[in-house]
Amino acid sequence: MSARTRELLALIPVSLLVTAGFAALLITRSADINEATATYGAVFLGLCVAAHLFIRARLPYADPYLFPLAALLAAFGLVMIYRITPDLARKQAQWFVFGLVVFCATITLLRDHRTLERYRYTIAAVSIALLLAPRMPGIGGATNGAYLSINLGALEFQPAEFAKIGVIVFLASYLRDTRDVLVRGRLPRLSLKHFGPLLIVWGAAMLMLIFIRDLGSSLMFFGAFLALLYVATARISFVVGGLGLFGVGAWFFSNHIQHVHERVQIWLDPFKHGVVEKEGYQIAQGLFAQADGGLFGRGFGRALLELPGGGTILPAPHTDLIYAVIADELGLFGAVGLLLVYLLFADRGFKTALIAGDAFSKLLATGLTAVMAIQVFVIVGGVTRVIPLTGVTLPLVSYGGSSIVANLLLLALLLIVSDHARREPGRGGVV
């Protein structure tokens, strides 16, 4: 069976999940199943099959499991968002369609991902500009104390979602050129130009803590960089040094920058002021929701999200706390099942890096996979109180047009790398 046939067959259970999910919600709400239930699954399957046919034509050797896994996450996200707010689910579906257009356009225009190396400094400059844009007057603004989005009239998006891809492209290209020096050189002999990227990325991570108040992106960017640095050099000393720098910076800012200090204190003790207070309410309610789900959950549509007199029990259930909703309705087993899908996606992404024939492709696939995996850890870790809660989205599941478009762009780049790697002689039989 060919890789593309396996990909097509893997899309069938995804459409069944959409159908079953909407059926469960409609039964809960109206005690019957109408014709729209099957329509949702059919439309989603049609969109995915169209994308599959495009992949079959343009990237015939690409990994056969990455796209079905991404489609599975997107389908699950649509069902969960529809359960929370049907209007937002319709908007999310529109963003998914637009994301597929961007996905196909990227594959069409970028025939060889290695051409990105020629524009690495331009990509880096654009990425930094995107990160700083939310603080620009007239187009940026604060949301819950953090500067995350920019508003250009009818268009509003979070630039950090796209900047993460640009930063990974730059770092993969730069480390490809300098890895030999970093590997062979002794630490005392390495000059500032060799440590320059490490210091710049560390400074950028600290800057995000202060300037745009985005703790989540700070963790995500720096974690992905350390992963790339280790893969490029295999020197654990660089990783330890990077973690030390980040730890010192985080300690300093958590004690001297007010909003960082408040976030850390809430994480350490969300119940200090009582759950009715604003400070710890979000984390506390998320923990209560996960405990309410137990092992098997309340069932689709059966968890209590809204108060009888109006208002929501869980703040931002469609974005920051969607994992808490999942754990409440599907239980620990369902939430762990979702995390296993992310682990499978990461496994296929790292598999792509392993079989890639050149250093840039290996680093690019590693970085793209790592940044997505770390993003999952950052938001799930925040909701479960392993680390401070941040404002990043659960990739392809949480509501957000910027997130779903950026992650479909990331998926396109991974598939392009995979296709080139599997085209090489001796790679045809790779699973």
Image (cartoon, grey):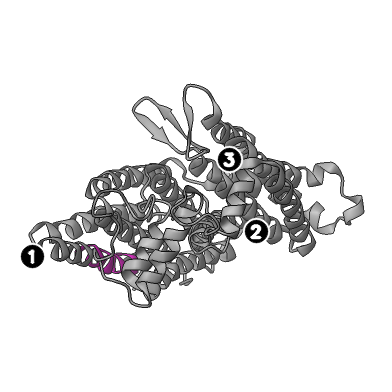
Residue bearing the label numbered 3: 213
Asked if residue 86 lies left or right of residue 213, the reply is left
Q: Quadrant of residue 122?
A: top right
Q: Report the number of numbered marks.
A: 3
Cα distance between the residues tagged 2 and 1: 50 Å
The magenta-colored residue range is: 6-19
Read off the residue under disc 1.
32
Crowd class of label 1 (few under 14; some 14 to 19; many from 20; radius 10 Å): few
Is residue 364 highlighted in magenta?
no
Badge 1 marks a residue whose secondary structure is: loop
3 left or right, relative to 97: right
> Which residue position holds label 2?
227
**Judging from the image, what secondary structure is the residue with disc 3 in?**
loop
Q: Is residue 151 above or below residue 396?
A: above
Give yes or no for residue 12 being in the magenta stretch: yes
**Amino acid identity at mark 3:** Arg
Q: Quarter of the image holding residue 212?
A: top right
N-term mark: 1 or 3: 1
User: Which label sits on residue 90?
Assistant: none
